[in-house]
Image (tube, rainbow, N blue to C red):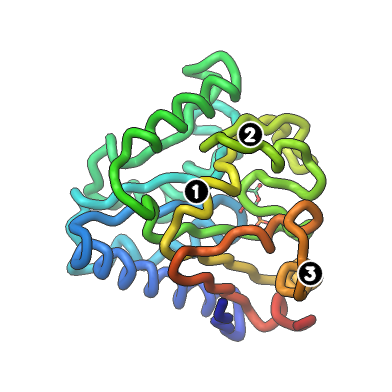
Amino acid sequence: MTIEQRATKDELGTAISEKLVAEIVAAQHDRGVAHIVLTGGSMGGLSLQALPGATGIDWSAVHFWWGDERFVPAGSPDRNDVEADRAALDALPVPAQHVHRVAGPDTVPDAESAAAAYSDAIRSTEGDGLFDVTMFGVGPDAHLASLFPHHPAQRTEGAIAIAVHDSPKPPPDRVSLTFECLGRSRTVWLMVAGAEKADAVAAALAPGADRWDVPASGVHGTESTVWWLDDAAASKL
Ligand SMILES: O=C1O[C@H](COP(=O)(O)O)[C@@H](O)[C@H](O)[C@H]1O
């Protein structure tokens, strides 16, 4: 585990997005394709800001996924993919079938159906290690994706994606990848800015942290895990 610290949230976003460009280039050099897992929340758009101006990337060989999605209709401002579209995806020549969105209630009856379809999409994607970079925001309660402290959905085993109901953070219905699936990533990035998240960061990085209490402590890359922090988020370390 390493920590990358920058003074401000804006500097953090710039550094993350520039490193993401480098990771995509490296993945394509090594394996011909890059699979990137996006996040919503306050760091979602910032983490993608360098992509539209990037050079040296074959956009036809990039796949985008989401670690979680809110179960609301396409185009809703509550959806994680809407901010990703605005920040980068709308401007990139990525084939639509490589942007793996989680279905919403406008196309499937419930979050369980959306989770099943999303699991099928992941299952049918070849590659060991599967994801190259998985990016997470972290909530003040130390949740990541839609895996919340003490929420029973967190303990689902043998699944790729799950429906999450009664989310403590609105909207209540969501789809999330499981810990099991999220761990199938070469590189995991946890991206946190703001003093209100300093306790969550300290709890996640404390020795012996338990993911039931502190979900952000529970995901590690097979090759590297990086905590990207601004000074405020790192202030209790
Ligand atoms: O609800 C969610 O929250 C987390 C963290 O969001 P933030 O606004 O506190 O940064 C986000 O990473 C996740 O994708 C999202 O669905």
As displayed, is residue 215 above or below residue 108?
below
Which residue in the rendered view is the most extreme toward the top? 109
- Say what amino acid the circle numbered 2 marks: Arg
Sequence-wise, which precedes: disc 2 or disc 3? Answer: 2
Pinpoint residue 120: horizontal percent, then vertical percent.
Answer: 41, 29
Residue 186 sits in quarter:
bottom left
Q: Which residue is mark 3?
A: 203
Determine the CA span between mark 2 and mark 3.
Answer: 25 Å
Q: Of circles 3 and 1, which is in front? A: 3
Pinpoint residue 114: horizontal percent, then vertical percent.
Answer: 52, 25
Label 1 crowding class (10 Å Cα cut-off): few <14, some 14-19, many 20+? Answer: many
Q: Which residue is mark 2?
A: 174
Q: Which residue is mark 1?
A: 83
As displayed, is residue 222 above or below residue 68?
below
Label 2 crowding class (10 Å Cα cut-off): few <14, some 14-19, many 20+? Answer: many
- Say what amino acid the circle numbered 1 marks: Glu
- Say what amino acid the circle numbered 3 marks: Ala
Query: Which numbered dot is residue 36?
Result: none
Determine the CA span between mark 3 and mark 1.
Answer: 28 Å
Identify which residue, 137 or 44, lies in the foreground: 137
Q: Note whether ligand 1 is within 8 Å of mark 2.
A: yes
Residue 154 at least partly seen:
yes
